[in-house]
Image (tube, helix red, strand yellow):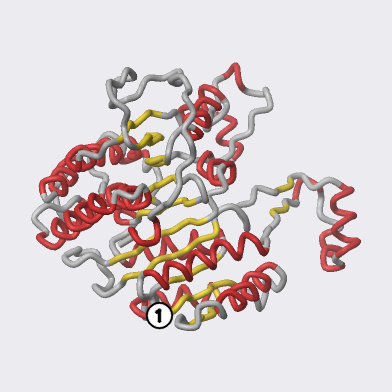
Amino acid sequence: FFGVWFTIKMKLAMQSISQGARAMRYFSSTQTQLKRHKIAWLPGDGIGIEVMDATKLVLDKLQLDAELEHGDIGWEIWCNEGNPLPDRTVDLLKRTDCALFGAITSKPKDEADLELKPELKGKGFVYTSPIVGMRQMFDLHTNMRPCKAYKGNPLNYRNDIDLVIFRENTEGMYSGVEFFPVAPELRTAISTHNKKFKRFEGVAADELALTLRCITKKGAERIIRSAFEFAKNNGRKNVTVCEKPNVLRETSGLFIRTARQIAKEYPGIELWETNIDAQCMWLIKSPQNYGVIVTSNLFGDILSDLSAQLVGGLGFAASGNIGDKYACFEPTHGSAPKYFGKGVANPMAMICTSQMMLAWLGEDEKAQKLQAAIATTLEEGKVQCKDMGGTASTIEMAKAVAAKI
């Protein structure tokens, strides 16, 4: 499914760097032979750990020739070190081909501050999402989220949904350019250049917060072209660009204009334009009409969760964060702390995510085998997790998929 679009032609030359502070979780640090791939293994928090363990069983059955090196990331690391994405993990990412990531716990700023170790409080540490930081640090500009209704899945909204959402991954409302409180000189500068801001002049400094929606032509071009290339290579007849240019005139306007320009290069693919609010309604009404949707960061986050529910929920929602030289693959669900340790999390999203990773690594045969095993397991319906109405545990579901390889 993803092989054509993801197959890569070049790899970065790997540097000879000593092992990190922590040993690999699944492989000895003293390898007797060079592995074909180096993968950063990032379980993170909560059920991320469990679904990664389950996915390891599937990758073992495929006999993937890879060195999996554990990396520290997430909430526990934040609480104990004041940085959820420590430098040693960044170094690990720099010396691997790609990353496979489970899930993380994230909380608002005030709550994050409260959970720091006592000796770290008041030291200037500020929590930021490690996955957002990773996307920006490694310029993983394309977030690809397939939403496919597998035959036999009792949670399908419809059985003919096969939608892929392309979400710009480094800009928009998630750029991280925020202000609170808003400094007087910034307020003055904004009022000088935009009179509409003057109605906020009387708002107290501690009662006003700002977040900038940053859209660049380069960022829009990359994600829109990725969507059109996927459509061309996979026989999709249309690409829907979803924004809100009637209200967000400058940022969404730039995105839409860029889409119109790029669409001219693909005469065999029709460009559809929708507004984000109407698109949410139409995905409920007739999701089978859409094959590829491309949008900005926040809108893509919303649409992909909505679309995931149409094909079984977050337990079936895979994604890839793709850059020019690196990629990080993750399920779209969170860490679900209340389910951690119970063995009830559906690992299918993580397993589907690993299938995307295999295709991106050029392991097309293994990717196709895994795709077939996933489809067969779901179609037979003999093994189903709790969210599907069954009784299978996380590990039992993974074993069922592995048995079909």
In terms of image quadrants, where is residue 149? Answer: bottom left
Please give left or right for residue 368 compared with residue 234 in the image.
Answer: left
Determine the image quadrant of residue 196: bottom right
Q: Pointer 1: residues within 10 angstroms few (<14), some, or many (20+)?
A: some
Please state if 348 lies on the left or on the right of 109 as rendered.
left
> Hey, what amino acid is under mark 1?
Lys
Between 14 and 83, which is closer to the camera in this rendering?
Answer: 14
Residue 235 as seen in the image, left or right of residue 378: right
In the image, is residue 327 above or below residue 197? above
Mark 1 residue element:
loop
Q: Quarter of the image for the N terminus: give it.
A: bottom left
Residue drawn at (45%, 21%) of the image = 20
Q: Residue at x 87, y 67 (%)?
A: 195
- Residue position for label 1: 237
Residue 96 spot, x, y in % from top left: 44, 35
Direction from residue 271 to residue 256 in the image, left or right: right
> Against 186, is 116 above or below?
above
Front residue of 354 and 191: 354
Q: Is residue 402 above or below residue 126?
A: below
Can residue 21 be seen here?
A: yes
